[in-house]
């Protein structure tokens, strides 16, 4: 019974830490959507979440260090986006 109480106590404390402590997710190593820094896809500079310019494209937020980088990205997005690999290789056609 003591183990059950200890488990519940630790679970509640971890929940409160993650829910209410600022930066708790980054302390635990989680860097997903909670990331405080972005990389400018045009020049490669680090951009803080509350600085620079932002643009939503295909459901993802891109941050830019300057208006110039934002404009360059907007002119030719495919140049700065990561290349998606096609999982399906072309199959050779069989002769009939």
Image (tube, helix red, strand yellow):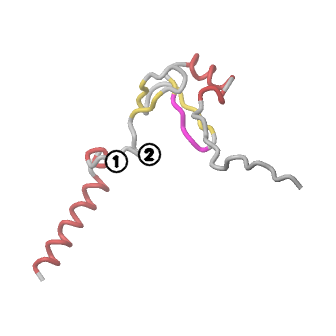
Residues under numbered marks 2 and 1 in contact, where contact means CB atoms less than 8 Å apart: no
User: In the image, residue 68 lies at what x, y percent?
Assistant: 58, 16
Q: CA distance from mark 2 to mark 1?
A: 9 Å
Asked whether residue 60 is drawn in magenta, I would say yes
Residue at far top of view? 68
> Magenta residues?
59-63
Task: Residue at 63% x, 26% y: name it.
Answer: 79
What secondary structure is the magenta-colored segment mainly? Answer: strand
* Res. 84 image quadrant: top right
Q: Residue at x 67, y 50 (%)?
A: 88
Q: Secondary structure at mark 2?
A: loop
Where does residue 50 sit, x and y in percent of width and height?
Answer: 43, 31
The vertical placement of 14 against 76, above or below, is: below
User: Viewer-proximal residue, 37 or 54?
Assistant: 37
Residue under circle 1? Answer: 30
Residue 4 or residue 93, whichever sits in front: 93
Farthest front residue? Answer: 95
Which corner quadrant of the image does residue 59 belong to?
A: top right
Identified at 61% across, 41% down, the residue is 85
23 w.r.t. 55: above or below: below
> Which residue: 41% across, 29% down?
48
Q: Which residue is mark 2?
A: 33
**Where, quadrant-wise, is the N terminus in this rendering?**
bottom left
Horizontal side of residue 21 vs 48, given as left or right? left
* Residue nearer the viewer, 18 or 31: 31
- Secondary structure under tag 1 reads loop
């Amino acid at each position: 019974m003591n183990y059950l109480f200890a488990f519940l106590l630790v679970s509640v404390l971890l929940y409160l830490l993650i829910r209410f402590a600022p930066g708790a997710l980054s302390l635990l190593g989680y860097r997903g959507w909670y990331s405080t820094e972005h990389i400018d896809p045009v020049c490669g500079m680090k951009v803080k979440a509350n600085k620079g310019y932002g643009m939503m494209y295909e459901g993802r937020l891109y941050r830019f260090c300057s208006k110039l980088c934002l404009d360059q990205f907007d002119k030719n997005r495919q140049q700065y986006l990561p290349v998606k690999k096609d999982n399906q290789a072309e199959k050779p056609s069989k002769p009939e």
